[in-house]
Image: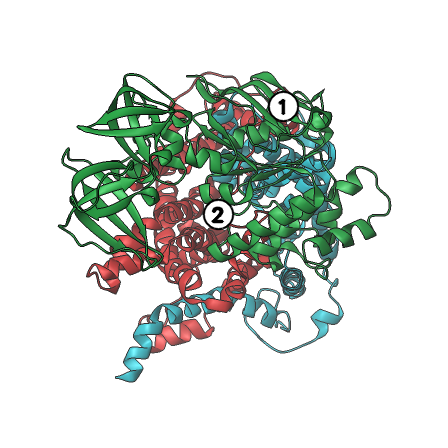
Chain colours: A cyan, B green, C red
Amino acid sequence: MRAGRWVADHFVMVVALLVLVYMFLPIFFVVLMSFNDPVSRLSYEFDGFTLNNWTDPCGPSGMCASVVKSLQIGFLATLGATVLGTLVAFALVRHRFRGRAATSLLIFLPMATPEVVMGSSLLALFTSVGLAGTLGFWSILVAHIMFCLSFVVVTVKARLAGLDSSLEQAAMDLYANEWQAFWRITFPLVFPGILAAALLSFSLSFDDFIVTNFNHGNTITFPMFVWGSAQRGIPPQVNVIGTVMFAVALLLVLSGGLLQRRRPA
Amino acid sequence: MATRTTDESPQTTSREEAGADLTLTSVTKRFGTFTAVDDLDLVVEQGRFFALLGPSGCGKTTTLRMVAGLEEPTSGTITIAGQDISRLKPYKRPVNTVFQSYALFPHLDIFENVAFGLRRRGVKDVKKQVQDMLELVELGGFGKRRPPQLSGGQQQRVALARALINRPQVLLLDEPLGALDLKLRRQMQIELKRIQTEVGITFVHVTHDQEEAMTMADTIAVMNQGVIEQMGAPAELYDSPATTFVSNFLGQSNLVKAEVVGRDGDDVVVDVQGSRVAAPRSRARRTDGTVWVGVRPEKVFLAHRGSETSDGSNLLGGGTVSDVSFIGVSTQYLVRMPWDQELTVFEQNSGARESFTVGDTVDLHWIPAHTFLLDADQDAHAGDLSYAALAGGPQ
Amino acid sequence: MSVAAAEAAAGGTVGHEPVPPPRRRGGSGYLLLLPGMLWLVLFFLVPTIQLVATSLYDPSGSLDTGYAMTWSFPNYWHALTSFTAPFLRSLVYATVSTGLALLLAYPLAYAIAFKSGRWKNLMLVAVIAPFFTSFLVRTLAWKSILSDNGFVVHVLQALHILGPDGRLLATSVAVITGLTYNFLPFMVLPLYASLEKIDLRLIEASKDLYADGFTSFRKVTLPLSMPGLVAGTLLTFIPAAGDYINAELLGTPKQYMIGNVIDSLFLVQLDYPAAAACSVILMLAIVAMVLFYVRRAGTEELL
């Protein structure tokens, strides 16, 4: 009877935790398989334990090069999307202009369009202007900035709209001109939003496959490498990279959270 | 209807200090078709604690923001010490503001918050000034803390320090005590008054709380729908209100319709539902035709019907007590008069007066000098916010 | 955190709704918008319009001989009839996986919003943490989990849900599992955001007015969480409908979705008009379903 009561009270939480377990199951397998010693290249099962994958992470040819490419593109795409997107967010929240509805729609559409459509239409465009033969780093970069932009706008806009404007008015009341009020008050307070947008951009870019697949020419990013090797057999070092990515990101988020807790502002 | 808007309080200073006065001349502010401030004329003398009092939406905050430079007047001029600041940016004006929400910069510590204005003006060594100012508001050791760590009252004091440290010619306060609980608010009212007296800067305090305004200010301007209804010392506004709005907004008033019948020396005599009532000429805003006879509830005494002779006091007879509320300090009576109006009487519970119960028939007495007369064309319920709330909407 | 601290941390100040500033006049808005919007116009809007145009090209052209614009609307009909199965499969798979995701996500979002106490932030991190690994690597992990010798298959065989030769991989089940999994956070987070905003006192009021726990949920919590629910389903359904990675990695050509078809038409068969026609039909189908859904759910202002 008591057990039944406990379950009823905690039913939702139990289900929630089960769902979380479900979500982490593949991660667990990624970490597990990073120690795998596969019997054959096409094996997806845990055949034996080995540390070799970790000591020789760049063994598979082209893999580490693809990771580097992904990092480079990720960094540049983040830079581009964050700068352009932040400017747009400021315009939307703080300025008057005509065509607000159309602008909002255009920003919203990429988030609602399947990647298949975005990637293939971009390829069609490049082809029609004769650039099909030159696709590569630059075309991937262009595409990534394109679909990251909307997410940056939405994220920064949310943060900016929540700012109390009386803070800037107080700054001007205290002898700061518009420029000073922006750099000393507005910008530091929006910055967490800009940072979040940048992180979001980076992870979207690094992880992107579909749009990249359509526009990559001969450049291989990490997701493309994984896709390609799925046919020929996945080297276990792929899971090493996956685990490292997970660990690094987790570390960043947790340390960010800790920083926030110690500094109450 | 003309209202007098120059300072009538007894301590009118000499014209030598007129240089530091704040003057608003024909200031109007329109938002689209809505007129928030309508042709306002105002002079605030240097060194005064001045209150702009009125219900929400009356234009007082808009007026304040125009002085601060955060709103631009549609027309009119604002000058300080003779200098026209009407079109100057906020950072060019010798004016600082304490905001209603305090607007403390959350990412800076208290020291930097207070030092902000000084730094923007290029002052190099701010440490001593900041420290002294924090001492003044009794937050000496709080320099390293951040705004979210402080209580409401402490934040309010930081906001004050941050503004005062710049020695503005005028300090504007936009309902700064609104977010504090009652006891703290009372304390801060006394604090603010003390600081103002010590520092000698002109304070312009915007509030909707009439008790707050009367407690703190040397001069009050009562605003309603973009215009100033009356301006003067608190006692003067209270004892001799110029309009029904002021009589209802400051404290409470009984307003009864009457006809002016004549003069008696310095008094105006009116006929109130058959009884003769006298009012001093100096408190009569209208001296002919139909008027409102006004008297404050605490000025009225109850007596059992027919028990006391008139002996020079004003008398309205034949009422029936319809409600008794014991408030501790006083007992509040509602008395229904024969012409079906309910009048309010506050009797001090000093022990010297007898008490009445519901159903008693009573007469109302009061000293004629406490009577005031208002124009009957004005709405008797103007400024009476509880009436407005119960009637379902602003009047 | 106290309310004041929370508000201040969000950039606001104590006891006060954030005041939106008056918007600046003049042309500076256009200047700020220009680079970003130009980028979107050039690399999103124009390609999309181009795509629609391409779908009407003469199908008998090719990359070498060039395409002639012949307004050949029959391309659409041709695409629909040639690829009916993948089309339908995409919509079905997307619907099923969205539904499953909703069933899984709602309790999780609810628990985080109302029952998590001081674990709230940790649980939120746990929701997005799986995204920290690569999408493809995660999906490949499912290949390991659902493999013929994996414990899942063994357990299901022991429970006689699967026959002794039964597989999970290379079946619709695997593909739908992958789809549900990959877009789950997109369902959880908007739901959580909506649920979080609900004032608990409303539920208390409902209970005060004689509604029991479940009825309170049905009549108060569920309707109030609708904006999040709608946003979550859209954010899940749309990418799921266009996905082809899960089908490719976890299924066989028998499970191929329209995404696989478009990919193949564009990159392998180089049949641009057909590929474009399929894309356009996919877009239209999504738009139609979204509009219908949003109107029914009554949250038009979502956009």
Q: Quadrant of residue B362?
A: top left
Mark 1 belongs to which amino acid?
A: Thr
Can residue B393 be seen in this snapshot?
Answer: yes
Q: Nearer the viewer, residue A160 or B342?
A: B342
| Pointer 1 and pointer 2 on the same chain | no
- Closer to the camera in the image, B356 or A64: B356
Mark 1: which secondary structure?
Answer: strand
Q: Which residue is mark 2?
A: C244
Q: Residues within 10 Å of mark 1 (few under 14, many from 20)?
A: many
Residue hosting label 1 = B23
Residue sitting at 27 percent across and 20 percent down? Answer: B260
Give coordinates of residue B297: x percent, y percent: 32, 42
Residue B391, labelled with which disc?
none
Q: Amino acid at mark 2?
A: Tyr
Identify the subunit bearing mark 1.
Answer: B
Q: Secondary structure at mark 2?
A: loop
> Residue B150: image x %, image y %?
61, 58
